[in-house]
Image (cartoon, helix red, strand yellow):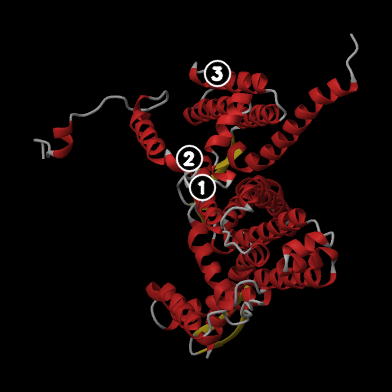
């Protein structure tokens, strides 16, 4: 089956751009994440964390690829990638707490970005954008008018943080125990 | 007199390091009118990359310290320059048309991010290495006090002078330097005349990060101790140096760095080491009261 030049371009170009980003990310992360120094018996020695480095670079590659797809009007591909990465983190396929959180958070953001790239999302985005220059005009933008509601939603999000996956502590001490000194003291 | 000379040598060495960092602040301010508060962390990353490179080269570089130093310098400059480029690309370029406050908050955010990134990846403990360049000259002795000039201090001063000459030549005699000066005067007009403004700004960040990496390597070698927090105070001091010399002025940054280094060294040597930062910042306050544009800064003239 023949593939048109345009089709080849649309497949190769995002991959090439994402690969370039991954190469830069590898250069940035190699001396910090890939190689690290530890003190053993009073002397400093070098150790490596190459699997973590490879995984971090892979996450950057997938994230960039998803962003390119969203930018190029392919929200289904972008959203699919985002959900896949987030699920991989959620299901524990990615080792390490930090990488897991990055995968879930980054994947979720990518999925949201994909939704914003759909036609409905674009309309919504324009409505809420602070860049549309309406905030100084009479009535203000939707963002300005609904600011208190968005603030309230963010407070709800903050309060929901302990229930999110990867939260280290889910149990709550009763409020009086936090306020009153313990008997042991 | 001997003690005075020793403090002078120490102050010049310290001033050279501050000056190299201060140039990064002043160049970025000159071109985009923004204080890059993450520049101290770029310096810290340069120091860490130098440390890691040294540790890797330690087994092979024992006999060839000079070659190892050059390799570490090049690796550190290159990788830190990539950090500088990425910082501009991710945190500042998208905000170029936004209000200045947004870019400032972004800079502070990047500073905190980079600190935590290094803390997580390299650990929170202080890293110390054995001295790589040891020995020095005893210039003269008197009253039981010997004035020494260590090889490390010579290396720091020579590298700084060499870099300053190269840097000055680049700014005054190359196309890139001319583009930078054009962007500094008027970015819109420079763009209309065919200067690639985005590229020029990126290269400015790259150069600033490269110089900060050299300073980072020198601090690693000179003091032998670094941690993830080392960029904060050094960054603040270098920023002070840039303001003292006149922010936006490259000779001013070097002069400011030298002044801060000398004030610190003499105050520590003759008064008390605890208040050396107070002395440096007090001089800054006094200079800014009587000369708000700094020592070599030019007042901004608003044309009507």
Return the chain for callout 2.
A
Answer few, some or many: residues within 10 Å of disc 2's Cα (few below 14, many 20 plus, some between 14 and 19). some
3 vs 1, front mark: 1
Which comes before the other along the chain, label 3 or label 2? 3
Q: Position of residue B138 (x, y in %)?
A: 61, 80
Which comes before the other along the chain, label 1 or label 2? 1
Q: Is residue A132 above or below residue A78?
A: below
Quadrant for the N terminus of chain A, please: top right
Q: Residue at x 59, y 44 (%)?
A: A132
Return the chain for callout 1.
A
Q: Say what secondary structure mark 3 lies in.
A: helix
Q: Position of residue B152 (x, y in %)?
A: 63, 68
Residue that label 3 marks: A88
Pointers 3 and 1 in contact (CB under 8 A)? no
Q: Residue at x 55, y 68 (%)?
A: B238
Instruction: Give the label on residue B289, or none.
Output: none
Answer few, some or many: residues within 10 Å of disc 3's Cα (few below 14, many 20 plus, some between 14 and 19). some
Return the chain for callout 3.
A
Label 3 and label 2: CA atoms lie apart by: 34 Å
Quadrant for the C terminus of chain A, please: top left
Residue that label 1 marks: A135
Q: Residue B231 vs residue B272: left or right?
A: right
Which comes before the other along the chain, label 3 or label 1? 3
Q: Say what secondary structure mark 2 lies in.
A: helix
- Residue closest to the eye, B297 or A137: A137
Residue B176, quarter of the rendered image: bottom right
Q: Residue at x 36, y 24 (%)?
A: A163
Q: Residue at the far front: name it.
A: A138
Residue that label 2 marks: A143
Pointers 1 and 2 in contact (CB under 8 A)? yes
- Residue closest to the eye, A91 or B2: A91
């Amino acid at each position: 089956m023949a593939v048109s030049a345009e089709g080849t371009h649309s497949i190769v170009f995002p991959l090439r751009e994402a690969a370039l980003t991954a190469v830069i990310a590898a250069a940035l992360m190699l001396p910090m994440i890939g190689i690290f120094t530890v003190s053993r018996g009073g002397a400093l020695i070098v150790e490596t964390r190459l699997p973590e480095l490879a995984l971090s670079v892979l996450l950057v590659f997938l994230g960039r690829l998803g962003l390119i797809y969203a930018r190029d009007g392919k929200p289904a591909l972008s959203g699919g990638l985002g959900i896949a990465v987030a699920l991989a983190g959620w299901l524990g396929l990615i080792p390490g707490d930090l990488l897991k959180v990055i995968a879930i958070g980054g994947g979720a953001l990518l999925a949201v970005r994909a939704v914003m790239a759909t036609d409905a999302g674009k309309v919504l985005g324009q409505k809420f954008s602070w860049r549309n220059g309406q905030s100084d005009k009479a009535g203000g933008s939707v963002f300005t008018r609904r600011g208190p509601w968005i603030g309230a939603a963010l407070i709800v999000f903050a309060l929901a943080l302990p229930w999110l996956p990867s939260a280290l502590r889910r149990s709550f001490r009763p409020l009086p125990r936090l306020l009153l000194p313990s008997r042991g003291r | 007199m001997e003690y005075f000379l020793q403090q002078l040598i120490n102050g010049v060495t310290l001033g050279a390091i501050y000056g190299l960092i201060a140039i990064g602040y002043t160049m970025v301010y000159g071109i985009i009118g923004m204080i890059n508060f993450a520049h101290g962390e770029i310096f810290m990353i340069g120091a860490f990359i130098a440390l890691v490179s040294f540790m890797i080269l330690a087994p092979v570089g024992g006999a060839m310290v000079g070659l190892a130093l050059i390799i570490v310098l090049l690796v550190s400059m290159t990788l830190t320059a990539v950090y500088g480029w990425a910082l501009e690309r991710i945190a500042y370029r998208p905000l170029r048309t936004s209000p200045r406050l947004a870019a400032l908050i972004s800079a502070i955010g990047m500073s905190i991010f980079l600190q935590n990134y290094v803390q997580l990846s390299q650990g929170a403990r202080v890293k110390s290495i054995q001295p790589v360049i040891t020995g020095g000259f005893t210039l003269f002795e008197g009253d039981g006090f010997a004035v020494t000039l260590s090889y490390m201090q010579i290396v720091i001063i020579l590298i700084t002078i060499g870099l300053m000459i190269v840097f000055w030549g680049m700014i005054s005699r190359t196309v890139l330097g001319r583009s930078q000066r054009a962007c500094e005067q008027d970015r819109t007009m420079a763009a209309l005349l065919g200067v690639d403004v985005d590229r020029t700004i990126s290269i400015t960040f790259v150069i600033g990060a490269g110089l900060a990496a050299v300073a980072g390597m020198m601090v690693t070698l000179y003091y032998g101790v670094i941690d993830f927090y080392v960029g904060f105070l050094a960054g603040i001091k270098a920023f002070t140096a840039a303001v003292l010399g006149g922010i936006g002025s490259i000779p001013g940054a070097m002069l400011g760095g030298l002044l801060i280094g000398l004030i610190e060294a003499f105050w520590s040597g003759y008064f008390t080491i605890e208040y050396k930062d107070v002395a440096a910042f007090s001089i800054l306050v006094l200079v800014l009261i009587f000369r708000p544009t700094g020592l070599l800064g030019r007042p901004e003239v608003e044309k009507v």
